[in-house]
Amino acid sequence: MEEELAFPILLADRVVTITSATDFRKLFLLLDNSIGDMKWLLNVFEVVDSNGGTGGGIVLSLPPIASNDPILSWVWSFGAAIQTSSSIIDRIDAANQLASLVVDNDRNKKIIVEEGGVPPLLKLLEEGVSAESQVAASTAFANLATDQERVRQMLRSIVRLATSSSSSTQTSSLFYFISRCN
């Protein structure tokens, strides 16, 4: 008789899972944090300028994911402004802000390189919209390239960008930057 009862009990253990209220609270908290992160991300890419159009200004707000490290939100905001802003003044300002973040701070340099700050700066440098934009991007690169390992990381990022693009301008910019770093 005991053997007959053992099989249904084992089957019930495998089929029925009891989820506690704590698990639901954890799930709700994770979903709530994810929604907050997405709202911040949408806010970064949907900046409204004073005329009611999109694409003006730099959003400096702290996303929930970066609440422990505000430098992350600055790097992400400045990178997004360099890549997506329609205003060259905002793009130059963002590049200058990135350049000033890294002055005498190796941790910020590492964060900017690791969080994808190099490709937007390279894009700004190669577009050559104005001399001021090229100076801002070059200053940021010069401030970032103070350590041999960081230069290697930057070059990996630039090579990845150059190989994913068919533009000969990007390739020539890559070789120019490499020649300046050696």
Image (cartoon, rainbow, N blue to C red):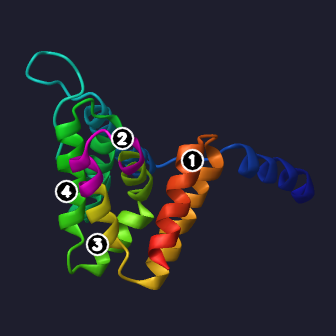
x, y percent for residue 131: 25, 48
Q: Which residue in the protein does label 4 denote?
A: 96
Along the viewing direction, whichever of 114 and 89 lies nearer the viewer: 89
Amino acid on which the number 4 mark rests in the picture? Asn
Q: Residue furthest bottom?
A: 148
Residue, disc 1: 18
Percent coordinates x, y for residue 153 in the rendering: 51, 71
Quarter of the image for residue 59 reads top left
Q: Say left or right for 162 vs 138.
A: right
Label 2 vs 4, first from the N-terminus? 2
Amino acid tagged 3 = Asn
Query: Residue drawn 50% across and 80% down?
Result: 182
Secondary structure found at label 4? helix
Locate residue 143, reporting x and y percent: 28, 72
Mark number displayed over residue 33: none
Disc 3 crowd rating (10 Å Cα; few below 14, some 14-19, many 20+) is: many
For disc 2, the marked residue is 83
Q: The residue tagged with tag 3: helix, strand or loop?
A: helix
When the figure is inspected, residue 95 is found, relative to residue 47, above or below; the finding is: below
| Overall secondary structure of the magenta section | helix
Q: Which residues are magenta?
A: 125-136
Question: Which residue: 80% across, 48% down?
Answer: 11
How far across and how far down the image is residue 4, in percent? 91, 51
Determine which residue is flagged by label 3: 143
Q: Are marks 3 and 4 in contact (CB under 8 Å)?
A: no
Whichever of callouts 1 and 4 sits on the residue coming sooner in the sequence is 1
The answer for how far apart the CA atoms under marks 1 and 2 are is 48 Å
Report the mark closest to the observer, 1 or 3: 3
